[in-house]
Image (tube, helix red, strand yellow):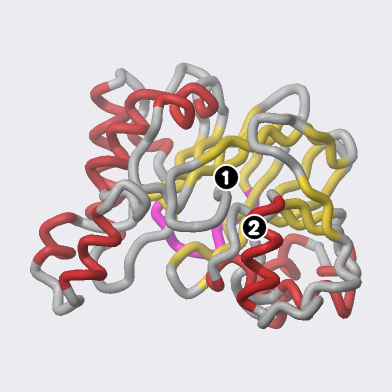
Amino acid sequence: MKFAVLASSSAGNATFVEGGGAKLLVDAGTNCKTLSAALAPLGVALADLDAVLLTHEHHDHVSSLAVLERRCGTPLYATAGTFEGCEQDRGGGGACEGWDCRCFEPGEPFEVGGLRVEPFSTPHDAADPVGFVLDDGSARLGLATDLGFATELVARRLRGCAALALEFNHDLRMLETSARPPSLIQRIRGRNGHLSNDQGAELLAAVAGSGLRHVVPMHLSGECNEPALAVAAARDALRAAGLDPGLVRRPAFPTPLLEI
């Protein structure tokens, strides 16, 4: 399996995955021009995609869906709650009519080509958000962003992955001293918000195993975090687990194509 994080921030999120004969995106939250430019060095065009998997309906994860559907008719996989959220955000009235929408339930695996997709519920302020583990039969990739805290379910699903793309959204001190309104700070810190660097590191320490090959810190705040802080927290977690801290990649996107 191969993957590349094309974008990951509050401005837009998308991750390319290739495995089991399938090519797909996890989320499509940046414009199609940006997606095309990020995919081109990988030798992939938007029309080559077999599916888009959606974690939830927030704009920074779904903003290019309408254009993707119009241009490519790419099948979209999401929970019913996520599709309903997309419909409401687009004004209802059948705004998503004609899209190739394929619903799944959290906890019920399904196949895209030869790639096994294992969705799991995450705590976030969205209709029915999920993370994913993708399995091509020889390696597993775990993706978990946009979660207010790491539940035992999340940790259980992520154990045994060869690569992990995990949220390290904010540095708590930077968040609390920021100019953001108290209501937004509370939302981000809440149990349906986003993981801090310390929380991301705790999750990484709980799930990292001897077969781990790549760790990508994800969804860093542009105002309330620094890449160096997120990387340091992740590397400290691997050291504490007796693993190589060099497995943590600097969160600069798009990443190269990473193989597991």
Residue that label 1 marks: 130
**How far is mark 2 from mark 1, CA to CA?**
9 Å
Where, quadrant-wise, is the N terminus in this rendering? Answer: top right
Residue that label 2 marks: 82
Residue 71 lies, in percent from the top left, at 88, 78
Q: Quadrant of residue 63?
A: bottom right
Identify the residue shown where x is 58% and y is 57%: 56
Q: Quadrant of residue 35?
A: bottom right
The stretch of residues the image draws in magenta is 250-257
Task: From the viewer's perspective, tell me whether residue 94 is left or right of residue 131.
Answer: right
Residue located farthest toward the front when viewing the structure as drawn: 93
Residue flagged by tag 1: what amino acid is it? Val
Residue 226 lies, in percent from the top left, at 25, 63
Residue flagged by tag 2: what amino acid is it? Thr
Instruction: Tell me whether circle 2 and circle 1 mark residues in contact (CB < 8 Å).
Output: yes
Task: From the viewer's perspective, tell me whether residue 13 is left or right of residue 252.
Answer: right
Residue 201 lies, in percent from the top left, at 29, 37
Residue 217 or residue 184, whichever sits in front: 184
Identify the residue shown where x is 42% and y is 57%: 251
Q: Give me the disc on residue 235.
A: none
Identify the residue shown where x is 46% and y is 47%: 216
Q: Is 74 a magenta residue?
A: no
Q: Quadrant of residue 88?
A: bottom right
Looking at the picture, does residue 258 appear above or below residue 182? above
Residue 95 lies, in percent from the top left, at 78, 79
Pointer 2 local density, CA inside 10 Å: few below 14, some 14–19, many at least 20: many
Looking at the picture, does residue 240 appear above or below residue 85? above
Looking at the picture, does residue 206 appear above or below residue 172? above
Task: From the viewer's perspective, tell me whether residue 182 is left or right of residue 154.
Answer: left
Identify the residue shown where x is 36% and y is 28%: 244
Q: Number of marks in the image?
A: 2
Task: From the viewer's perspective, tell me whether residue 104 is left or right of residue 199.
Answer: right
